[in-house]
Amino acid sequence: MNFIDAIILGLVEGITEFLPVSSTGHLILASRLLSLPQSEFVKSFEIAIQVGGIMAVVVLYGRTLLIKKEVIKKVLTAFLPTAVIGLVFYKLVKTYFLGNDSVVLLSLFFGGICLILFEWWYKEKDSAAKSISEISYKQAFFIGLFQAIAIIPGVSRSAATIIGGLFLNLKRQTVVEFSFLLAIPTLAAAAGLDLIKTPASFSATEVSLFLVGFFVSFAVALAAISFLLQFVKNNSFVSFGIYRIFAAIIFWLFIL
């Protein structure tokens, strides 16, 4: 991997982390297009640059977390099931799922179908939670269970939490913002666990690549978050579902 590769992967991460299209899946496919082998370093890089996305959320929502302690408790409640499931299946996912093009493409394809079918079925109720403060701890916990499905590359953490939140009777903007906040402990734990579990040490050049990917993903994620907040005010997620399906088909036919 060189610095151009790191910049490209940082762009991909920043754009896709908070959109319901799967950042991990896109990073794996982007690495394939760049002819990067799925080495331990590349796998760790793809996880670690997600910290850039975390920092974007902290910058935008840090004040909310500092002022509203109840929000922190609900975010941690949602994080709990994801943490347990992620810890149990960490080795399985990194060994057999990360870097597996077939798993990613199937997840992208069927995840797109699920988004479209869900939007066709879904009707927002007047009783839907209008703010994060209205989310119950039970709802938060089950959103965390939905998020845990995203340990499979290509599923999309954002899509899983958004669908889960809408199913549990939250308004679109509410569940999108909660998904942003839930990304902080989730991505931080994923990156931290990977650094602890990965036995290899990184060279100065590799650390520099981490930093480049981090800063690029951070800057782009700021814009992606703002875009999604505006998008959900007047749009459904059908377009993302269609994109996922076509992306999976095109990659399968012309790249693989």
Image (spheres, rainbow, N blue to C red):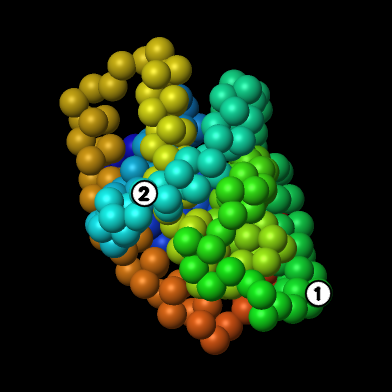
Q: Is residue 255 above or below residue 82?
A: below
Question: Where does the image place residue 123, in percent across and percent down from the top left?
Answer: 74, 78
Give how far across and how far down residue 244 sits, in percent. Answer: 64, 64
Q: Is residue 175 visible?
A: yes
Residue drawn at (73%, 50%), measured in percent from left and top?
A: 106
Tally the marks. 2
| Drawn side of residue 3 relative to residue 227, left or right | left
The kind of secondary structure element at disc 1 is helix
Where's residue 18, x and y in %?
47, 59
Residue at coordinates 49% horizontally, 79% vertically from top-left?
231
Q: Secondary structure at mark 2?
A: helix
Quarter of the rendering containing residue 117 = bottom right
Look at 55% across and 35% down and name the residue there.
Answer: 80
Q: Quadrant of residue 51?
A: top left
Q: Mark 2 — residue?
A: 69
Q: Judge the density around disc 1: few (<14), some (14-19), many (≥20) Cα neighbours within 10 Å.
A: few
What residue appears at the point 67 percent right and 57 percent down from the top-left corner? Answer: 164
Answer with the quarter of the image where residue 253 lies: bottom right
User: Which numbered dot is residue 121?
Assistant: 1
